[in-house]
Amino acid sequence: MLRLDASRADFAAQFDALVNARREADADVSDTVRDIIAKVRNGGDAALAELTKTFDRHDLDATGWRVSEEEMQAALDGLPTELRTALELAAERIAAYHEKQRPEDRDEIDAAGVRLGARWGAVDAAGLYVPGGRAAYPSSVLMNAIPAKVAGVRRIVIVTPTPGGEMNPLVLAAARIAGVTEVWRVGGAQAIAALAYGTERIAPVDVITGPGNAWVAEAKRQLYGVVGIDMVAGPSEIVVVADAQNDPEWTAADLLSQSEHDPTSQSILFTDDAAFADAVASAVDAQIPQLSTAQTARTSWDANGAIILVPTLEAAMPLVDRLAPEHLELAVDDPDALFAMVRHAGSVFLGRMTPEAVGDYVAGPNHVLPTGRRARFSSGLSVLDFMKRTSFLALDKAAIEAIGPAAVALARAEGLPAHAASVARRLGLPS
Amino acid sequence: MLRLDASRADFAAQFDALVNARREADADVSDTVRDIIAKVRNGGDAALAELTKTFDRHDLDATGWRVSEEEMQAALDGLPTELRTALELAAERIAAYHEKQRPEDRDEIDAAGVRLGARWGAVDAAGLYVPGGRAAYPSSVLMNAIPAKVAGVRRIVIVTPTPGGEMNPLVLAAARIAGVTEVWRVGGAQAIAALAYGTERIAPVDVITGPGNAWVAEAKRQLYGVVGIDMVAGPSEIVVVADAQNDPEWTAADLLSQSEHDPTSQSILFTDDAAFADAVASAVDAQIPQLSTAQTARTSWDANGAIILVPTLEAAMPLVDRLAPEHLELAVDDPDALFAMVRHAGSVFLGRMTPEAVGDYVAGPNHVLPTGRRARFSSGLSVLDFMKRTSFLALDKAAIEAIGPAAVALARAEGLPAHAASVARRLGLPS
């Protein structure tokens, strides 16, 4: 864990190093992935089955390609009541928040008599990647599938690796709650290729979202343009801005809630009180051994954690903007004053009673958020990621007479005579 | 030019082939581009100068790195009045249309007492690539820079290759009208790398938009994630749906307005009248030799043009959806009836008096639109491409008591004890 003090002469250089440190793996898997994509594009289901045998060690014809609706319902029925209620509350709140993201259509006539508008529509089909193993989170299924559902996507498809054929029942239950009916037991770059190009069994989709390993991420990047994708995702991160009036145990738990995700996760505390900083550092050390995720949390905190002492919390805000963190907690009495200073953050958690983890599950806003300083230019997953806009235009004779001559002049200046002619002919001008 | 008849037995197969034909170059420039990016990232301005000498054949230190505001103003002052008025009308109408795209913030408290919201902000800096030579269109400068300006972007930067040091004065004038103050005489993949990583002279940007050749497109794709980018762009295309009540000369001009862009452009007519189809085909052949762009238009029309006879125009609409065209003209008396059937198109031009070219210049909606069937999942350039959304959340004691226990249950089920503890501690529960 790094301790910095903004009053020190070398702070600027040290903070620069922290901002520019890359925690993202640079594994060059692009050739392997290009090869896998080509195999699936050319070989369809046969290639998919062979790659699944190689990477996931199971025979799709034996375990079944697709999870039946009965299996999904059984997974839901088998959940303890507490978990089922929790998933249903989460689904309901996520749907309610995302409903309000649905964009409005436009259709108006301006002063020149030109009718102008835009109409939004859902994509036909969306594919959701669900990782196998440790990172198979039912909450992620809800966070990806529900915005697609709210957008009006007719077909939502899950692909997920099932090494040995086994599926996580919590994931299946969440898929059932979210209304997903199509789940395939395939994963890796080969599953992304199948979703993008389609195979005999799996019809292609238009948008692919969801987290994955380096191969999955590279496959999405290579297929960007063939399909739409969500943002390139890096390790999770949190910045907590807290004064000394916080309980250091709470702040420590908040920091650890990111550290426990992955050895490359990052947790950073800004505080204006050195004694509070020490108390949090001690609490983190005391709490780590209590966690079943202790090893990951320890590695992450030691390698990427930081506590930064600032003269005032206001002075921290430009520093926070440089980090453009995925998650930002403002644990003070008047968080709105600090929030007004924030330009770049994925999601902000206001006040002492708003731990980031509540947003991961049940609050409503999406937990798929930009990482690695990408909040400078990108947003969390939303209904808009599953929709597209068609602009439209209608002119009558008066309208084209009003604005057409300018189009003719510009088309000619750009050396595009057929553009000019298509307008000029309607104006009765020489083309 | 391909003639198809939907009543023929082999139509489905022929139309499939048309839909799946790839007009995008598969030039594998990825290694070259990766090398150029690394050079600029490591070598900064010195590398940029060397690459400019190699590819654009001019010495930046001699011609000047940056275009001065005086040069930009001189270009504007030097324009013929007709062109200046046309550019200003275009700029004003584009700004008016895009102003209405500015999204609204949200801030509400729900029944559980949870405060939920989203706040939009502009990116700090946007980079706009302007190609040199034939494709240096002042209209594209307006279409890219004005949405950024309307979004509230503080710094808008143009990079453009200037082989021999010469700049297109129309482009400079358009940049001046759009309020761009920073223009660099650099182009190619090296300019994209400079915008993404920054050099000694050029500060980095957050989003890069604008058209370019294969190297530029590949550089944007490789740097996607380091910066935001607009959509991957392919050759331009138009679909015209027209009945026999249209003037075949107008329809022919509309088709040629795409054919003249590039040998890989595509123009397709759907009509329900064989005699009208013949008349348009003849008009196209008669008009081509009159164009200064005849060679390009001829190549494009011969290789990629199509006229498709359909039993009714309604029957054409599902076929149009499969093409998901960049531009769609509905040249009929009641275009809204057909428009209601359209699911996938970048921009739609309604009625007989709305040639696509009017939308390229002065109508207001953006002319940067999804090509190559990408209207299935993506939208034209908009103010949103230069903004990002920060979601936020605030709970008080009552709110966390209402929804916190569900978060604890889900966190535990996902095997994330620190997530659970961060909520449980605030609830006074055992962590």
Image (spheres, coloured by chain):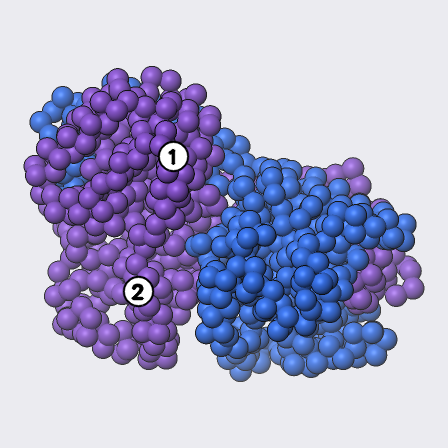
Chain colours: A purple, B blue
Q: Is residue B291 above or below residue A234?
A: below
In the image shown, does A160 or B47 lie closer to the viewer? Answer: B47
Judged left or right of residue A169, residue B255 is: right
Chain under disc 2: A
Q: Which quarter of the figure is the N terminus of chain A placed in?
A: top left
Q: Which residue is under mark 1? A: A9
Question: Where in the figure is residue B156, as x and y percent of width and height?
Answer: 62, 46
Question: Where in the figure is residue B113, as x and y percent of width and height?
Answer: 32, 20
* Residue positioned most to the front: A9
The three-letter amino acid code for the residue at tag 1 is Ala
Q: Is residue B210 above or below residue A237?
A: below
Name the residue rendered at 76%, 80% in the picture. B295
Chain under disc 1: A
Judged left or right of residue A362, residue A193 is: right
Q: Does residue A414 appear in this view?
A: yes
In the image shown, does B34 or B422 lie closer to the viewer? Answer: B34
Location of residue B177 by image quarter: top right
